[in-house]
Image: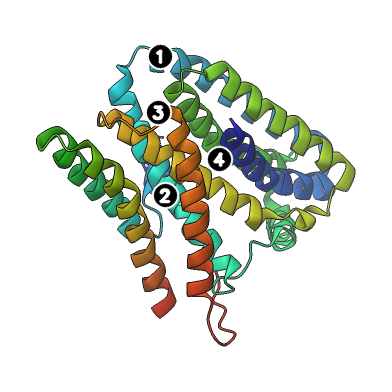
């Protein structure tokens, strides 16, 4: 049951696109540094959606090349 | 709560496909029993986990939930863009129906008292329903509107169930990819907004920023579909 539960979350969050999982974690880390470390609100507002778009673009680019 | 409704509807169409296939092949009693037990199990899960979520600090909850929504939304959007551009084969409900029927036939020799049909219906409804539960709990708890999110999912259940009764095997007519793309845009927008709030970002215009994010990701999605679309017909399997 524990293995099944862990597998569900793995499939749910990682699945066949581990790059998106890693990217989301990195994005939140970077934005946390910008907002909470450097206290930059405007930069964080712009960075969060733009980095998400960049992550999606990279993942799509990989799929396109396959 | 449109995101909850649409995401729930998409997952429920997938569950309905399996239940209809099981019902047609093995009879409706084990199919409906399996579905009913799965729904009860999910309801128990919501009853246990739901109230606990309201006790978590809001910023931490929004960061975690926003992160989960962002990951999940990006996955949905990626798949929907690849399907819309023709690079990935479209989700085929008729094929799922056929595979489920074949699986039941293959297991026919070993089955007793419609156990296979019960288990298949239970698994289909439980696994798809679990995704609905996560979406309802995360989005509902972040907005502190768990009741409204649950009602949105219930509305989706009633509508998809009603449509399922009427159309039965015509599930491939549901424009699933368009719905999935819309949900993807909404989930990424909510994920960006909530994770930002969890990181103490002050969005310009407060909640109105969500509308801008939805418009932004919708335009980006359209651009990506155009960019990814291959110049010649190359279709890979999902």
Q: Which residue is mark 1?
A: B54
Q: Which residue is mark 2?
A: A11
Find the distance from the CA under tag 2 to the CA under tag 3.
Answer: 34 Å
Q: Residue at x 75, y 61 (%)?
A: B94
Disc on res. B127: 4
Sequence-wise, the earlier of marks 1 and 3 is: 1
**Element on which disc 1 rests:** loop
Label 1 or label 4, whichever lies nearer to me, is 1
Label 1 or label 2, whichever lies nearer to me, is 1
The answer to which image quadrant residue B12 occupies is: top right
Q: Which residue is mark 3?
A: B206
Q: Is residue A58 left or right of residue B84?
A: left
x then y, percent, for residue B167: 87, 47
- Would you call the spot at circle 4 few (<14 residues within 10 Å), some (14-19), or many (20 or more)? some
Find the distance from the CA under tag 1 to the CA under tag 4.
Answer: 24 Å
| Residue ranking furthest to the bottom | B232
Q: Is residue A3 left or right of residue B34?
A: left
Depth check: give the residue in front, B64 or B44.
Answer: B64
Depth check: give the residue in front, A3 or B7.
Answer: B7
Q: Residue at x 33, y 19 (%)?
A: B58
Q: Is residue B38 left or right of residue B95?
A: left
Q: Chain of mark 3?
A: B
Label 1 or label 3, whichever lies nearer to me, is 3
Q: Residue at x 45, y 22 (%)?
A: B141
């Amino acid at each position: 049951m524990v293995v099944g539960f862990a597998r569900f979350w793995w499939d749910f969050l990682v699945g066949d696109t581990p790059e998106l999982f890693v990217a989301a974690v990195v994005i939140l880390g970077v934005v946390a540094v910008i907002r909470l470390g450097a206290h930059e609100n405007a930069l964080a507002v712009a960075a969060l959606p733009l980095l998400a778009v960049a992550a999606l673009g990279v993942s799509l680019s990989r799929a396109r090349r396959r | 709560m449109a995101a909850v409704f649409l995401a729930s509807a998409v997952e429920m169409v997938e569950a309905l496909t399996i239940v209809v296939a099981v019902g047609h092949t093995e009879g409706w009693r084990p199919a409906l029993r399996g579905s009913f037990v799965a729904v009860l199990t999910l309801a128990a899960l919501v009853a246990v986990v739901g109230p606990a979520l309201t006790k978590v600090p809001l910023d931490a909850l929004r960061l975690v939930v926003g992160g989960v929504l962002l990951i999940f939304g990006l996955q949905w959007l990626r798949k929907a863009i690849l399907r819309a551009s023709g690079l990935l084969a479209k989700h085929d409900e008729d094929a799922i129906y056929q595979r489920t029927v074949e699986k039941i036939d293959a297991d026919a020799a070993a089955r007793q008292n419609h156990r296979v049909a019960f288990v298949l219906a239970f698994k289909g409804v439980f696994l798809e329903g679990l995704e609905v539960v996560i979406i309802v709990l995360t989005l509902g708890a972040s907005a502190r509107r768990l009741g409204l999110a649950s009602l949105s999912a219930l509305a989706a259940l009633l509508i998809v169930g009603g449509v399922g009764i009427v159309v039965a095997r015509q599930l491939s007519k549901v424009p699933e990819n368009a719905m999935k793309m819309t949900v993807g845009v909404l989930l990424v927008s909510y994920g960006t907004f909530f994770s930002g709030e969890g990181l103490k970002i002050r969005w310009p215009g407060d909640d109105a920023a969500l509308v801008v994010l939805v418009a932004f990701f919708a335009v980006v999605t359209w651009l990506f579909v155009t960019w990814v679309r291959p110049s010649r017909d190359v279709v890979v399997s999902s």
